[in-house]
Image (tube, rainbow, N blue to C red):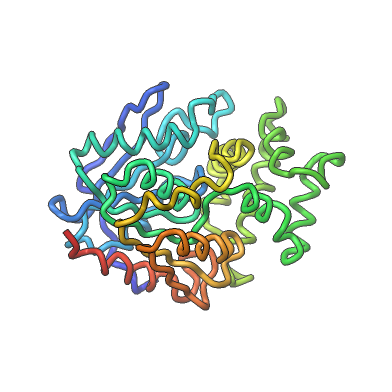
Amino acid sequence: MSDLYPEIEPYDQGMLAVGDGNLIYWETCGNPHGKPALVLHGGPGSGCSTGMRRYFDPRAYRVILFDQRGCGRSTPHASDPRTDLAANTTKHLLADIERLREHLGIDRWLVFGGSWGSTLGLAYAEQNPQRVSEIILVGVTTTRRAEIDWLYRGVAPLFPAQWARFRAGAPAGERDGDLVTAYYRLLHDPNAAVREQAARDWCTWESALESIDPDAKPDPRRLQPTFQMTFARIVTHYFYHNAWLEDGVLLREAGALVGIPGVMVQGRLDLAAPLVTAWELAQAWPDGELVLVNSGGHSPRDPGMSEAIIAATDRFAAAP
């Protein structure tokens, strides 16, 4: 990761009230007078990491990061079983982004999203094309039903041991059905021990798909009980509801992106977000360039991924 830009700290940060009792944490880094760039984290429910700041030249960019509802430093926190997620939907997150843009006085910004963040970024750009100068997507997803089914069954033959453990975590009568639904129910079980085990099992399975390196260590956050519960609750909440998106709508409405230049950085070996989605988006979005990293998977730490990401941000750094 030595190719990343140096570590930086925020020059401004705060908590923004976005309604429904939610406060979202936001921060700005880099050059206060630089090109605005919005960073949308993955998950959903992972929260921002400090490493995301390092994909942007701090002399050129005003980098804006925020923790989506219920995760990271935002409150109320999904790790608390009393936190109701009814007001945590894709529609709410899109409204939060616009509220943050207005709060920071930004007219247009580059939108950067990875994994789930690419779904959210696409949805935002298609809804608000006049607010988007460029788009960079990494590990492209659109959260179609087929993509969810791939993650929680289709990819199983490539990870038989990990799949067996994940499947065994579901109730006996539900192991051959929809495991997203099974785990969604487990994570709402009145027994705290049941919820905690389900969160561990969910995060262990997710970690198996992250990198092409079978010996790669998982994100340290995924070993923390608070993170596990937050992540598992939010991601199952979104995927159980198909992210409140009509199936395939983001590809069908990609015509709204005409005139917005963009780059899709995609690992050819990405097993969490298979290449076909990025390829289909590239066909529907003439101004979006698909950059394939032949040695890369889903993790930005895989070989060649961070170099391709930085090449994309550097490309747009000087654009008006």
Residue 122 appears left or right of 155: left
Identify which residue is drawn at 45% across, 53% down: 118
Q: In the rendered view of the protein, which quadrant contains the C terminus?
A: bottom left
What residue do we see at 54% from left, 24% from top?
Answer: 84
Residue 3 sits in quarter: bottom left
Please indicate whether residue 230 sits to the left or right of residue 164 in the image. left
Q: Nearer the viewer, residue 4 or 137?
A: 137
Name the spot of residue 158 as percent of width and height, x first: 72, 66
- The extreme bottom residue here reads 294
In x, y percent, where is residue 226? 54, 40
Q: Quadrant of the image for the N terminus?
A: bottom left
Q: Is residue 217 visible to us here?
A: no
Give the image location of residue 31, x and y in percent.
16, 55
Res. 154 visible in picture? yes
User: Where is 27 relative to 304, above or below?
Assistant: above
Q: Position of residue 85 (x, y in %)?
A: 53, 28
Describe residue 10's horizontal placement relative to residue 147 as left or right: left
**Residue that lies at the very extreme toward the left in this rendered image:** 33
Residue at 54% x, 34% y is 79
In depth, the one of 223 and 28 nearer the eye is 28
